[in-house]
Image (spheres, rainbow, N blue to C red):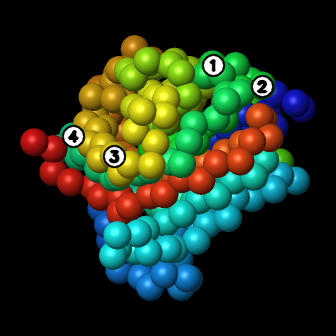
Amino acid sequence: MRAPLTIAASLVFAFAFAGAIALEPRFIAPFSAAEPGAELPRGWEVLSVAHRKLPEFRLVRDAGETVLRVHAEAAVGSLGHSLSVEPGTAALSWRWKVDHVLDKARLGTREGDDFAARVYVSFDVPLETLSFTARAKIKLAQIIYGAHLPTAAICYVWDNRSPVGTSMWNPYTDRLRMVVLESGNARAGQWVVETRNLDADFQAAFGAQWGKPTPRITGVAVAADTDQTLETVTAWFGDLRIEARR
């Protein structure tokens, strides 16, 4: 049972509640429209891992704008938002900031699978298209967690040492592709803007298995996690947006 449990813990970040309804199919509720200290905007849901401490998710003011602060002390969990987006012309943009990177994290290892900041995107790959082994693991994890776990997801990370552009499978599952967008402390404490071509990123990660067209995007999630390394980190996220690809 250990393997399905760790797969579920890895994928639950990217999971958007099956019962959650996005305000609009392409709309991600903005943090900037809320007041600091208020409840999270409608559409965002805390996604926890069983028997693990959650990070603190809080709306705060930063340079005159409300943003999300995620503070993790030996904690794991994410904040997810459901979507229904055809990715052919879609780009995802956001800005993020970290106070520092993690000392003990090691990309590609189970014991070091922690990051100062993560952004997940989940895709609706039909379960029946996966191998028998992959289907069995995901179905068992769904039974254990009572949740709909994504069949494919990309995780964009702020790593501590790997070169920007590094891409590899998560050490627990080949249903989650890790992509390093920022690395090290050179830009710690600074807001950094990211924009990703989701169609191109999915094809680079899963195209050989799945082919075209890229399946529908079902959700996004943000996180900072330190349950493996037992470190403490704070990350901030500005609004996430689905935009027309240029």
Which residue corresponds to the image point at 70% horizontal and 58% vertical from the top-left?
Answer: 55
Residue 3 visible at all: yes
Q: Nearer the viewer, residue 182 or 3?
A: 182
**Residue denoted by label 4:** 88
- Residues under labels 2 and 1: Cα distance? 9 Å
Q: Which is nearer the N-term, disc 1 or disc 4?
A: 4
Q: Which is nearer the N-term, disc 4 or disc 3?
A: 4
Q: Which is nearer the N-term, disc 2 or disc 3?
A: 2
- Residues under labels 1 and 3: Cα distance? 24 Å
Which mark lies nearer to you, 2 or 3? 3
Q: Quadrant of the C terminus?
A: top left
- Up/down of 137 relative to 171, above or below: below
Q: Which is nearer the N-term, disc 4 or disc 2?
A: 4
Residue 49 visible at all: no
**Residue denoted by label 2:** 111
- Residues under labels 1 and 4: Cα distance? 29 Å
Displayed quadrant of residue 106: top right
Which mark lies nearer to you, 1 or 3? 3
How many other residues sit within 10 Å of disc 4, few (<14), some (14-19) or many (≥20)?
A: some
Spot occupied by residue 236 in the image (x, y as percentages of width and height): 48, 57
Which residue corresponds to the image point at 54% horizontal and 59% vertical from the top-left?
Answer: 80
- Residues under labels 2 and 3: Cα distance? 28 Å
How many other residues sit within 10 Å of disc 3, few (<14), some (14-19) or many (≥20)?
A: some
Amino acid type indicated by mark 3: Val
**Residue denoted by label 3:** 192
Amino acid type indicated by mark 4: Gly
Which residue corresponds to the image point at 42% horizontal and 82% vertical from the top-left?
Answer: 34
- Up/down of 35 relative to 227, above or below: below
